[in-house]
């Protein structure tokens, strides 16, 4: 069970990181 919970946290943090990276990339294109 602990492994599953850790996997969800890792997936969530990875998704947050990818979204933040995408926003930074889009911001650079618009400037």
Image (cartoon, rainbow, N blue to C red):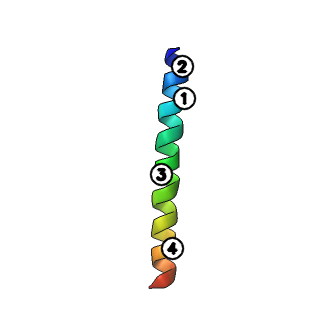
Residue situated in front as seen by the camera: 4 or 28 = 4
Query: Marks 3/2: CA distance?
Result: 21 Å
Disc with the residue nearer the chain's start (1 vs 3): 1
Disc with the residue nearer the chain's start (3 vs 2): 2
Residue corresponding to mark 2: 3
Cβ atoms at labels 4 and 3 below 8 Å apart: no
Q: Residue at x 51, y 45 (%)?
A: 14
Mark 3 secondary-structure assignment: helix
Cβ atoms at labels 1 and 2 below 8 Å apart: yes
Disc with the residue nearer the chain's start (1 vs 4): 1
4 left or right of 13 in image: right
Residue corresponding to mark 3: 17
Q: Which x, y percent locates residue 25?
A: 51, 70
Q: How many marks?
A: 4
Residue corresponding to mark 4: 26
Q: Residue at x 50, y 35 (%)?
A: 10
Q: Quadrant of the C terminus?
A: bottom left
Cβ atoms at labels 1 and 3 below 8 Å apart: no
Residue corresponding to mark 1: 7
């Amino acid at each position: 069970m602990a492994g599953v919970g850790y996997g969800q946290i890792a997936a969530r943090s990875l998704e947050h990181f990818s979204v933040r990276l995408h926003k930074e990339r889009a911001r650079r294109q618009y400037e």
